[in-house]
Amino acid sequence: MNSRTTRITTGLAALAGLAGFALLIAYHNLAKLGDLLATASWGIAVVILAHIPQLIFCAVAWRAAASALWSEGLRTFFFARLVRESVSGILPVTLVGGDFVGARILTFYGARQVVAGGSVLVDLTFEFVTQIMFTAIGLLALLIVDSGSVVTHWALLGLAIAIPAAVGAVLVQKWGIFRVVERLLEKLATKLGWPALLSLTDLHETVATLYRNRRGVLVGTANHLSSWLFGAVEVWLILFFLGHEVSLADALIIESLGQAIRSAAFLVPAALGIQEGGYLVLGTLFGLAPEVGLSISLIKRIREIVLGVPALLVWQAFEARRLIDASRE
C-alpha cells in the first residue's frame, strides 16, 4: 500500500469514526451527557492525575526494553511515552504513528536510530502480550459474573485469535523477520540514494540483543501488566465520581474489554467512535445507563487532551529548535 493510499484509507477511517462519535453523542442526548460530566466536576482532575502512574509504569517498561544497548533517565522515557500516547490519541493518525514519534524523541537524547526503533518494537511486543494477559484476566472475571453474555462469547473468540498472534509476533522477531527488512532498506538506500536508511540495517541484531536481556524482558512485561491493571482504577474512579459505584472487579472487566475493543480498531485514528460504543455496551452489562458508559469514554478523551496537548506543543518546540539549529549549520 503506497503512502497516498494509506493517507486516503486513514482519512476515510477517521471520518467514519468521527461520524460514529457524533451519532452516539447526538442519540444519547448531549445535555444529559453534559449533566453527567458536570456531576464528576473536580473528580475529572483526579482521574487525569491517576493516569500518571500508568505512564510511569510504561516508561519504566520501555527503559527496561532499551537498557541492554542504551541507558537514559526515566524522565526521557516518560516524556517520550507521553508524546507517543498523545500522537496516537489526539492526532488523526493510526496507532503506529505515535510509536514512530516516540522513537524519534529518543534520538534527540542520543539514542542511535536503530536502537530507538528496536526498543519501540520490543516495548510494543511487551505491551501487546500483556494486554492479552489483561484481557484474559478480565474475561475470567466476566465468566465468573456472567458466563452466558454475548460479549463474553465474542471476547473469547477475539482472545483465541489474539493469543496465536502474540506468539507469532514474538517468534517472527526471533526467527529473523527484520533480516528481510534490513535487505529491503539496503536496496532502497542504494536505489534512492538515502544513506540514512543504512542506519537501520542492524535492526535484527539490535532486537535480538534486547530480547537476550532477561531482566529487561521481565521488568518490561511486569510494568506493562501493572499499567493495564491500574487502568481499572481509572475506570473505578470515573464511575465513582459519576455517582455509580462498582467493584474493582467490575471496573477491571470494563477496562480490559474496553481496551481490547480500542486496540482491535487500530485502523481508525484514536479509535474514535469505536471506543465510545465499546464502553457504552460494556457498561450495560453492569446495569449502567448508556449515557454513563459513554461518559467513561468521554472523560478518558478529556484526560488525553489535558495531558496530551501540552506534550505535543513541547514536542513541536523541540522539532522547531532542531530545524533552526540545522538551518544555522
Image: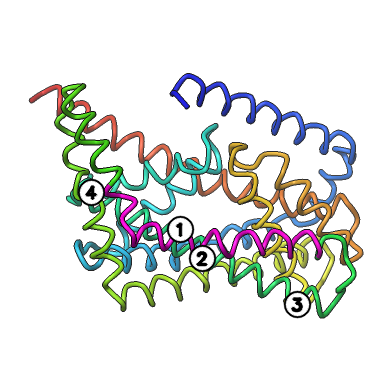
* Image height of 120 relative to 140, above or below: above
Image quadrant in which you'd find residue 58:
bottom left
Give the mark toward the camera: 3 or 2.
2
The reply to whether the C-beta atoms of the residues labelled 1 and 2 are less than 8 Å apart is yes
For badge 4, the amino acid type reads: Val
Which is nearer the N-term, disc 3 or disc 4? 4
Residue with the mark numbered 3: 141
Image coordinates for residue 151, horizontal then vertical, percent: 82, 60
- Determine crowd level at label 4: few under 14, some 14-19, many 20+ residues with C-alpha closer than 10 A: many
Q: CA distance from mark 3 to mark 4?
A: 41 Å
Alpha carbon of mark 1 to alpha carbon of mark 3: how far?
27 Å
- Check residue 159 for magenta coloring: yes
Q: Residue at x 49, y 40 (%)?
A: 309
| Residue type of the residue flagged with mark 2 | Val
- Tell me where residue 221 sits by quadrant: bottom left
Q: Report the residue marked by disc 2.
A: 129
Identify the magenta region. Answer: 153-179
Say how many tags the image has. Answer: 4
Q: Which residue is mark 1?
A: 169
Amino acid at the residue labelled 1: Ala
**Marked residue nearer the N-terminal end (1 or 3):** 3
* Residue at 79%, 73% in the rendered image: 142
Q: Is residue 109 left or right of residue 297?
A: left
Side (left or right) of 124 relative to 208: right
**Label 1's element?**
helix
> Which residue position holds label 4?
114
Q: Position of residue 62 (x, y in %)?
A: 36, 62
Give the mark toward the camera: 1 or 3: 1
225 in relation to 25, above or below: below
